[in-house]
Amino acid sequence: MKSLLGELRGLFFLEYRHLPTSIDQQIELLRSRGMAGDTSLMRRWLITVGYYRLSAYWLPYEVPPAKGETRSKRFGIGTDFAEIVDIYVFDRKLRLLVMEAIDRFEIAVRARWTNRLSVAHGSHAHMQSHLFLDGFKHAQMHSKIAQRSADSSEVFVEHYRRKYTNPFLPPLWQVTELMSFGELSHWVVNTRDNDLKDQLARDIGLPNKETLEGTLQLLSYIRNICAHHSRLWNRKTVKRSQNIRHFRVDLDIDRSGKQHQPRNSIYNVLVVLARTLRHQSPDTTFPQRVSNLVETRIPAQQAAMGFPADWRSRPIWKSERQPARSWKWLPSVLRTKLGKG
Protein backbone atom coordinates (compact mmCIF):
# COMPACT_ATOMS: atom_id res chain seq x y z
CA MET A 1 0.00 0.00 0.00
CA LYS A 2 2.82 2.39 0.90
CA SER A 3 4.59 1.75 -2.40
CA LEU A 4 1.36 2.43 -4.30
CA LEU A 5 0.92 5.73 -2.44
CA GLY A 6 4.51 6.57 -3.26
CA GLU A 7 3.94 5.93 -6.95
CA LEU A 8 0.77 8.02 -6.95
CA ARG A 9 2.58 10.83 -5.16
CA GLY A 10 5.27 10.70 -7.81
CA LEU A 11 2.67 11.22 -10.50
CA PHE A 12 1.26 14.39 -8.98
CA PHE A 13 4.11 15.89 -6.90
CA LEU A 14 7.62 16.84 -7.96
CA GLU A 15 10.54 16.39 -5.63
CA TYR A 16 12.52 19.58 -5.07
CA ARG A 17 15.99 18.96 -6.51
CA HIS A 18 17.51 22.45 -6.77
CA LEU A 19 20.95 22.60 -5.17
CA PRO A 20 22.39 25.61 -3.31
CA THR A 21 24.75 27.75 -5.38
CA SER A 22 27.81 29.80 -4.54
CA ILE A 23 27.98 33.53 -5.21
CA ASP A 24 30.24 32.91 -8.20
CA GLN A 25 27.74 30.40 -9.60
CA GLN A 26 24.91 32.90 -9.11
CA ILE A 27 26.84 35.57 -11.02
CA GLU A 28 27.57 33.12 -13.82
CA LEU A 29 23.90 32.10 -13.95
CA LEU A 30 22.76 35.72 -14.22
CA ARG A 31 25.25 36.40 -17.01
CA SER A 32 24.17 33.26 -18.90
CA ARG A 33 20.61 34.61 -18.84
CA GLY A 34 21.63 37.96 -20.28
CA MET A 35 22.33 40.11 -17.22
CA ALA A 36 25.17 42.60 -17.71
CA GLY A 37 26.91 44.53 -14.95
CA ASP A 38 29.94 45.07 -12.79
CA THR A 39 31.05 41.81 -11.14
CA SER A 40 32.08 43.47 -7.87
CA LEU A 41 28.65 45.17 -7.65
CA MET A 42 26.89 41.86 -8.28
CA ARG A 43 29.01 40.09 -5.69
CA ARG A 44 28.40 42.72 -3.00
CA TRP A 45 24.62 42.74 -3.43
CA LEU A 46 24.29 38.98 -3.76
CA ILE A 47 26.26 38.60 -0.52
CA THR A 48 24.46 41.29 1.48
CA VAL A 49 20.92 41.04 0.08
CA GLY A 50 20.73 37.62 -1.51
CA TYR A 51 19.83 36.09 -4.86
CA TYR A 52 16.32 35.04 -3.90
CA ARG A 53 15.26 38.44 -2.51
CA LEU A 54 16.71 40.28 -5.50
CA SER A 55 14.98 37.92 -7.94
CA ALA A 56 11.65 39.63 -7.17
CA TYR A 57 13.15 42.86 -8.50
CA TRP A 58 14.62 41.51 -11.73
CA LEU A 59 11.48 39.60 -12.67
CA PRO A 60 10.01 42.62 -14.61
CA TYR A 61 13.24 42.72 -16.66
CA GLU A 62 12.78 39.17 -17.98
CA VAL A 63 11.42 38.78 -21.52
CA PRO A 64 7.83 37.46 -21.64
CA PRO A 65 7.60 33.66 -21.36
CA ALA A 66 6.76 31.51 -24.34
CA LYS A 67 3.46 29.68 -24.45
CA GLY A 68 3.45 26.99 -21.79
CA GLU A 69 6.27 28.64 -19.79
CA THR A 70 5.80 30.22 -16.38
CA ARG A 71 8.95 32.34 -16.72
CA SER A 72 11.41 32.80 -19.53
CA LYS A 73 14.37 33.28 -17.14
CA ARG A 74 16.00 35.36 -19.89
CA PHE A 75 16.69 39.06 -19.54
CA GLY A 76 15.93 41.67 -22.15
CA ILE A 77 18.81 43.06 -24.18
CA GLY A 78 20.74 45.68 -22.23
CA THR A 79 19.52 44.69 -18.76
CA ASP A 80 22.18 45.77 -16.27
CA PHE A 81 22.48 44.67 -12.66
CA ALA A 82 22.77 48.34 -11.63
CA GLU A 83 19.11 48.78 -12.67
CA ILE A 84 18.09 46.04 -10.24
CA VAL A 85 20.02 47.77 -7.45
CA ASP A 86 18.36 51.06 -8.38
CA ILE A 87 14.80 49.72 -8.15
CA TYR A 88 15.65 47.83 -4.94
CA VAL A 89 16.93 51.04 -3.31
CA PHE A 90 13.84 52.91 -4.53
CA ASP A 91 11.61 50.25 -2.97
CA ARG A 92 13.47 50.55 0.32
CA LYS A 93 12.95 54.33 0.34
CA LEU A 94 9.27 53.83 -0.48
CA ARG A 95 8.85 51.34 2.39
CA LEU A 96 10.41 53.81 4.82
CA LEU A 97 8.01 56.54 3.70
CA VAL A 98 5.03 54.20 3.97
CA MET A 99 6.10 52.92 7.40
CA GLU A 100 6.39 56.50 8.67
CA ALA A 101 2.88 57.30 7.43
CA ILE A 102 1.35 54.11 8.85
CA ASP A 103 3.04 54.79 12.20
CA ARG A 104 1.34 58.19 12.32
CA PHE A 105 -2.00 56.67 11.31
CA GLU A 106 -1.64 53.95 13.94
CA ILE A 107 -0.77 56.37 16.74
CA ALA A 108 -3.73 58.59 15.85
CA VAL A 109 -6.13 55.61 15.91
CA ARG A 110 -4.61 54.41 19.18
CA ALA A 111 -4.97 57.81 20.81
CA ARG A 112 -8.53 58.53 19.64
CA TRP A 113 -9.94 55.02 20.29
CA THR A 114 -8.38 54.95 23.76
CA ASN A 115 -9.73 58.36 24.64
CA ARG A 116 -13.23 57.85 23.28
CA LEU A 117 -13.69 54.37 24.76
CA SER A 118 -12.30 55.25 28.19
CA VAL A 119 -14.29 58.50 28.47
CA ALA A 120 -17.47 56.65 27.50
CA HIS A 121 -16.96 53.46 29.53
CA GLY A 122 -14.23 54.00 32.09
CA SER A 123 -10.50 53.48 32.54
CA HIS A 124 -10.76 49.68 32.26
CA ALA A 125 -13.27 49.44 29.42
CA HIS A 126 -11.07 46.79 27.78
CA MET A 127 -11.95 44.38 30.64
CA GLN A 128 -15.71 44.64 30.01
CA SER A 129 -16.69 41.91 27.56
CA HIS A 130 -20.17 43.36 26.95
CA LEU A 131 -18.55 46.33 25.21
CA PHE A 132 -17.29 44.05 22.45
CA LEU A 133 -19.10 42.18 19.69
CA ASP A 134 -17.62 38.71 20.07
CA GLY A 135 -17.23 37.41 23.61
CA PHE A 136 -14.87 34.60 22.58
CA LYS A 137 -12.74 36.98 20.53
CA HIS A 138 -12.64 39.39 23.45
CA ALA A 139 -11.52 36.59 25.78
CA GLN A 140 -8.64 35.77 23.41
CA MET A 141 -7.57 39.40 23.05
CA HIS A 142 -7.92 40.00 26.79
CA SER A 143 -5.82 36.93 27.60
CA LYS A 144 -3.09 38.02 25.21
CA ILE A 145 -2.85 41.56 26.56
CA ALA A 146 -2.99 40.29 30.16
CA GLN A 147 -0.01 38.01 29.50
CA ARG A 148 1.88 40.81 27.81
CA SER A 149 1.20 43.11 30.76
CA ALA A 150 2.43 40.42 33.17
CA ASP A 151 5.64 39.97 31.15
CA SER A 152 6.24 43.65 30.42
CA SER A 153 9.22 45.49 31.86
CA GLU A 154 7.90 48.88 30.73
CA VAL A 155 8.30 51.45 33.52
CA PHE A 156 4.63 52.44 33.47
CA VAL A 157 3.50 48.80 33.77
CA GLU A 158 5.90 48.02 36.61
CA HIS A 159 4.74 51.15 38.41
CA TYR A 160 1.11 50.05 38.10
CA ARG A 161 1.90 46.56 39.42
CA ARG A 162 3.76 47.96 42.41
CA LYS A 163 1.09 50.50 43.34
CA TYR A 164 -2.25 48.86 42.46
CA THR A 165 -3.72 45.41 42.94
CA ASN A 166 -7.21 45.95 41.56
CA PRO A 167 -7.97 45.79 38.68
CA PHE A 168 -4.99 43.54 37.92
CA LEU A 169 -4.57 45.06 34.45
CA PRO A 170 -3.37 48.63 33.85
CA PRO A 171 -5.86 51.17 32.39
CA LEU A 172 -6.73 51.24 28.71
CA TRP A 173 -4.34 54.07 27.83
CA GLN A 174 -1.46 51.96 29.14
CA VAL A 175 -2.32 48.55 27.69
CA THR A 176 -2.87 49.99 24.22
CA GLU A 177 0.81 50.96 24.25
CA LEU A 178 1.59 47.23 24.45
CA MET A 179 -0.53 46.31 21.41
CA SER A 180 0.79 45.80 17.90
CA PHE A 181 -1.02 47.57 15.08
CA GLY A 182 -2.68 44.30 14.09
CA GLU A 183 -3.92 43.73 17.65
CA LEU A 184 -5.16 47.31 17.93
CA SER A 185 -7.09 46.81 14.68
CA HIS A 186 -8.82 43.72 16.12
CA TRP A 187 -9.80 45.60 19.29
CA VAL A 188 -11.23 48.50 17.27
CA VAL A 189 -13.15 46.26 14.85
CA ASN A 190 -14.56 44.19 17.74
CA THR A 191 -15.81 47.29 19.60
CA ARG A 192 -19.60 47.11 19.90
CA ASP A 193 -20.33 50.86 20.01
CA ASN A 194 -20.91 51.79 16.36
CA ASP A 195 -21.41 55.47 17.14
CA LEU A 196 -17.99 55.52 18.78
CA LYS A 197 -16.42 53.86 15.74
CA ASP A 198 -18.12 56.37 13.41
CA GLN A 199 -16.71 59.20 15.53
CA LEU A 200 -13.28 57.56 15.48
CA ALA A 201 -13.43 57.26 11.69
CA ARG A 202 -14.18 60.97 11.36
CA ASP A 203 -11.32 61.76 13.76
CA ILE A 204 -8.96 59.99 11.35
CA GLY A 205 -10.41 61.54 8.19
CA LEU A 206 -12.66 58.67 7.07
CA PRO A 207 -16.44 58.86 6.64
CA ASN A 208 -17.70 55.93 8.75
CA LYS A 209 -16.89 52.76 10.67
CA GLU A 210 -17.03 50.54 7.57
CA THR A 211 -14.28 52.49 5.82
CA LEU A 212 -12.33 52.65 9.09
CA GLU A 213 -12.43 48.87 9.54
CA GLY A 214 -11.48 48.22 5.91
CA THR A 215 -8.62 50.73 6.06
CA LEU A 216 -7.30 49.22 9.30
CA GLN A 217 -7.18 45.79 7.65
CA LEU A 218 -5.48 47.19 4.53
CA LEU A 219 -2.84 49.17 6.41
CA SER A 220 -2.14 46.34 8.85
CA TYR A 221 -1.43 44.14 5.83
CA ILE A 222 0.80 46.79 4.21
CA ARG A 223 2.66 47.35 7.48
CA ASN A 224 3.48 43.64 7.68
CA ILE A 225 4.93 43.79 4.16
CA CYS A 226 7.13 46.72 5.15
CA ALA A 227 8.13 45.22 8.50
CA HIS A 228 9.40 42.09 6.73
CA HIS A 229 11.28 44.21 4.16
CA SER A 230 9.28 42.62 1.36
CA ARG A 231 8.86 44.06 -2.13
CA LEU A 232 6.27 46.85 -2.11
CA TRP A 233 6.64 49.09 -5.15
CA ASN A 234 4.72 47.09 -7.80
CA ARG A 235 2.77 44.73 -5.57
CA LYS A 236 -0.87 43.98 -6.27
CA THR A 237 -2.42 44.15 -2.82
CA VAL A 238 -4.57 41.30 -1.52
CA LYS A 239 -6.90 43.86 0.04
CA ARG A 240 -8.28 46.86 -1.83
CA SER A 241 -8.53 50.45 -0.66
CA GLN A 242 -12.01 51.48 0.39
CA ASN A 243 -14.12 53.23 -2.25
CA ILE A 244 -14.42 56.50 -0.34
CA ARG A 245 -16.49 59.08 -2.19
CA HIS A 246 -14.44 62.16 -1.33
CA PHE A 247 -11.19 60.31 -2.16
CA ARG A 248 -12.34 59.38 -5.69
CA VAL A 249 -10.76 62.42 -7.36
CA ASP A 250 -7.41 60.99 -6.28
CA LEU A 251 -8.02 57.22 -6.36
CA ASP A 252 -7.40 55.11 -9.45
CA ILE A 253 -10.76 53.43 -10.08
CA ASP A 254 -11.31 50.29 -12.13
CA ARG A 255 -14.41 51.10 -14.22
CA SER A 256 -14.38 47.94 -16.33
CA GLY A 257 -17.05 46.09 -14.32
CA LYS A 258 -20.50 46.95 -13.04
CA GLN A 259 -19.11 47.90 -9.62
CA HIS A 260 -16.46 50.56 -9.94
CA GLN A 261 -13.79 49.81 -7.35
CA PRO A 262 -10.31 51.16 -6.54
CA ARG A 263 -7.60 49.03 -8.13
CA ASN A 264 -5.52 46.91 -5.77
CA SER A 265 -2.37 48.95 -6.30
CA ILE A 266 0.20 50.63 -4.08
CA TYR A 267 -0.83 53.96 -5.63
CA ASN A 268 -4.24 53.77 -3.95
CA VAL A 269 -2.65 52.87 -0.61
CA LEU A 270 -0.52 56.01 -0.92
CA VAL A 271 -3.64 58.07 -1.65
CA VAL A 272 -5.34 56.82 1.53
CA LEU A 273 -2.24 57.55 3.62
CA ALA A 274 -1.79 61.00 2.09
CA ARG A 275 -5.45 61.90 2.60
CA THR A 276 -5.62 60.75 6.24
CA LEU A 277 -2.30 62.37 7.12
CA ARG A 278 -3.41 65.67 5.59
CA HIS A 279 -6.60 65.46 7.67
CA GLN A 280 -4.49 65.12 10.83
CA SER A 281 -1.86 67.63 9.80
CA PRO A 282 -2.73 70.03 6.94
CA ASP A 283 0.94 70.99 6.55
CA THR A 284 2.18 67.40 6.14
CA THR A 285 4.99 66.97 3.62
CA PHE A 286 4.15 63.31 2.96
CA PRO A 287 2.40 63.85 -0.42
CA GLN A 288 5.25 65.99 -1.70
CA ARG A 289 7.89 63.49 -0.54
CA VAL A 290 6.02 60.67 -2.26
CA SER A 291 5.78 62.75 -5.45
CA ASN A 292 9.49 63.56 -5.36
CA LEU A 293 10.39 59.90 -4.92
CA VAL A 294 8.02 58.65 -7.63
CA GLU A 295 9.34 61.26 -10.07
CA THR A 296 12.65 59.35 -10.05
CA ARG A 297 10.90 56.45 -11.84
CA ILE A 298 10.26 56.09 -15.57
CA PRO A 299 6.58 56.14 -16.69
CA ALA A 300 6.47 52.33 -17.10
CA GLN A 301 7.54 51.86 -13.48
CA GLN A 302 5.05 54.45 -12.26
CA ALA A 303 2.33 52.57 -14.15
CA ALA A 304 3.46 49.30 -12.53
CA MET A 305 2.76 50.93 -9.16
CA GLY A 306 -0.74 51.84 -10.31
CA PHE A 307 -0.06 55.55 -10.86
CA PRO A 308 -2.47 56.83 -13.54
CA ALA A 309 -1.00 58.87 -16.38
CA ASP A 310 -2.57 62.07 -14.98
CA TRP A 311 -1.58 61.49 -11.34
CA ARG A 312 0.28 64.80 -11.08
CA SER A 313 -2.96 66.69 -11.69
CA ARG A 314 -4.86 64.87 -8.92
CA PRO A 315 -5.52 67.21 -5.94
CA ILE A 316 -3.59 65.26 -3.30
CA TRP A 317 -0.32 65.38 -5.27
CA LYS A 318 -0.46 69.03 -6.27
CA SER A 319 2.05 71.17 -4.44
CA GLU A 320 0.29 73.59 -2.16
CA ARG A 321 1.94 76.61 -0.64
CA GLN A 322 1.63 76.10 3.08
CA PRO A 323 1.30 79.02 5.49
CA ALA A 324 4.47 79.99 7.33
CA ARG A 325 4.93 78.01 10.53
CA SER A 326 3.91 79.90 13.65
CA TRP A 327 6.41 79.96 16.51
CA LYS A 328 4.18 81.86 18.95
CA TRP A 329 3.80 78.76 21.13
CA LEU A 330 7.49 79.04 22.10
CA PRO A 331 8.46 81.22 25.09
CA SER A 332 9.64 84.66 23.95
CA VAL A 333 13.20 83.99 25.20
CA LEU A 334 13.50 80.92 22.97
CA ARG A 335 11.93 82.74 20.02
CA THR A 336 14.57 85.45 20.35
CA LYS A 337 17.42 82.91 20.50
CA LEU A 338 16.11 81.08 17.44
CA GLY A 339 15.56 84.30 15.53
CA LYS A 340 11.83 83.62 15.21
CA GLY A 341 10.68 86.95 16.50
Image: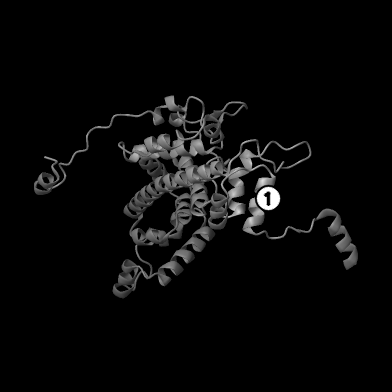
Give the image location of residue 279, x and y in percent: 35, 37
Compared with residue 266, is residue 167 higher up or lower down, i.e. above or below? below
Compared with residue 268, is residue 221 higher up or lower down, i.e. above or below? below
Q: Residue at x 56, y 35 (%)?
A: 304
Label 1 is placed on what type of residue?
Answer: Leu
Give the image location of residue 316, x and y in percent: 40, 31
Identify the element where label 1 is drawn: helix
Whether residue 206 appears in this view of the structure is no
Quarter occupied by residue 260: top right
The residue at which mark 1 appears reads as 29
In the rendered structure, the answer to whether residue 33 lies left or right of residue 46 reads right
User: Which sits in the foreground, 29 or 150?
Assistant: 29
Q: Residue at x 45, y 69 (%)?
A: 147
Query: How many numbered tags mark residues here?
Result: 1
Give the image location of residue 101, x and y in percent: 40, 45
Compared with residue 71, is residue 113 higher up or lower down, i.e. above or below? below
Quarter occupied by residue 325: top left
Give the image location of residue 333, x and y in percent: 9, 48
